[in-house]
Amino acid sequence: MQDLGEALLRLAMRHSPVGMMVTSPAGEMLAVNEAACAMLGYEHDELVGASWQDITHPEDLATDIDLVAATLAGERASYRLNKRYVRKDGEVLWGDLSVALLRDDDGSPLHFISQILDVTEQRIAAERIAEANATIEKHARTVAAIYDAVDVGLVLIDRSGRYEQVNRRHSDFMRLAYPEGHHGMAGQTGEVFEADGVTPMARQDLPSHRATAGDEFDDVRLWVGSDPATRRALSVSARSTRHADGSLAGAALAYKDVTDFMRALAVKDEFVASVSHELRTPLTSVLGHLEILEQRRDLPHDVRHQLAVVDRNAARLEMLVSDLLYVAQEADATLQVRRIPADVAAVVHDAFEAARPMAAGTGVALSADLPDSLLAMCDPQRLRQVVDNLVSNGLKYTDAGGEVHVRLRAVDDRMELQVSDTGIGIAPEDVARLFARFYRADTERVKLTAGTGLGLNIVRSIVEACGGEVRVDSEVGRGSTFTAWIPLVVPGDE
């Protein structure tokens, strides 16, 4: 019967796809099957007679020895262990080892029967997964720390508008906007006001409601809170999040505190309005006295001519003061234009000639390509402002030896005014904000050049009030081209 059992064991070892070996209680390998030899990279004769301890990884040897001792002592009949083996080529193999001890009839240990399953790939995969999970957890902790540390309110909402995550900063804003508590859903109205700080913001205009619908935007300004001492102004931006198939998953919103900026704008507007009012009073007096002088019949011709020049420039100065007052008080209003029959070419030519002294003083060449005449219904004073501002802007930011070129032409049903320069150019990030009130690019040249940041804003306001549009094309270091298109209304066709 014992012979039959041994024959069956040898047969099983020979055909088993799992590594198998028979070892003595002392650790000598008595039999090793082909699967174990292939797994460990040894020939059969190299393993038989050797000790299993010789092929065990040093770091796992003590554990295996302890389990063998416990089994021999009768404390257990078998054991299972994930351990490392050292192959003949020096590579490490992870094995899932199962060991059982056979005893004779009187209980004396006969030999161990071991089965070894190669789990190296699974072990490596598990280690990689563990490393990846550890990395993910570390990044998650880092993101969470940054999420709560940044001085910007951050909100994540799902497709239904439910708030999934809100950082500490935004929680502060929500306490101001919703003193009675927030329901955790987008579109909840509360103490949220438009940019004027007075008009309650309607539900459909709330950034969270707009973001839920997939709307993406930047710099939407609003106020939260009704107490003047604690209320804050916020600039809100939103970006959609989407599933792999492109469908809307939700949105991320950022709320930046711009209270100091908004209050500074208000103070600036009040200051500009005050200065404008103060300037208007003496200007009105000057214009009044000029009108009285011009009515005198005893003035020499040259004096009358000089008074006309003074009167014309005083009138222009009055309009500039009016525009300054306008941009301070009516940022969202439209400039009023008074269209009369005029020669646009003559208006542009006068502005061109008036800029010659400035061009000569800065060493910049000034050239023009103008038609002999271009009759249109326009506001000559406003058009002159556009040309003055664009030409002055080109001269200020063009170095000596450069050129500013003015071109006027009729293109289909529009007149096209173009002012090009070979100056310092405008960075792409500044182009989008170039026509905003008081905006000046953050460069050393701009900082050292006198200006209010209103000229281009007035240009856009006038052009748009005339039903046109203005655009700038620029490259840093190569210059800029400002182009204004205004509908060409010929006298008699209006």
Image (cartoon, helix red, strand yellow):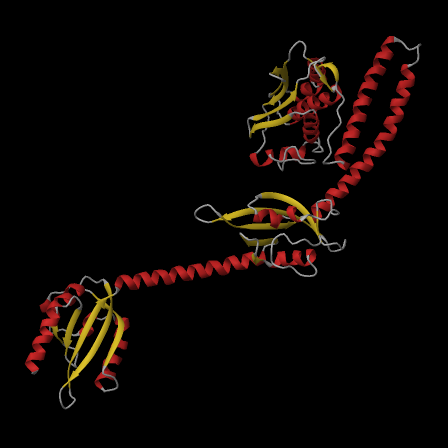
Residue 454 visible in the picture = yes
Q: Quarter of the image holding residue 65?
A: bottom left
Please state if 303 lies on the left or on the right of 161 as rendered.
right
Residue 289: % across, % down: 91, 21
Residue toward you, 41 or 137: 137
Q: Is residue 129 above or below residue 220?
A: below
Residue 351: % across, % down: 71, 18
Residue 106: % across, % down: 14, 91
| Rendered residue at 11%/67% (across/down) | 15
Q: Quarter of the image holding residue 94?
A: bottom left
Q: Is residue 267 above or below residue 387?
A: below
Q: Quarter of the image holding residue 62?
A: bottom left
Quadrant in which the N terminus appears? bottom left
Residue 32 visible in the picture = no
Quadrant in which the C terminus appears? top right
Please state if 97 lies on the left or on the right of 185 as rendered.
left
Please state if 79 lies on the left or on the right of 205 as rendered.
left
| Rendered residue at 69%/21% (across/down) | 387
Residue toward you, 327 or 349: 327
| Rendered residue at 18%/64% (across/down) | 39
Residue toward you, 327 or 85: 327
Q: Is residue 14 above or below residue 481?
A: below
Residue 14: % across, % down: 10, 69
Looking at the rendered structure, the number of numbered marks drawn on it comes to 0
Please state if 233 lies on the left or on the right of 133 as rendered.
right
Residue toward you, 269 or 164: 164
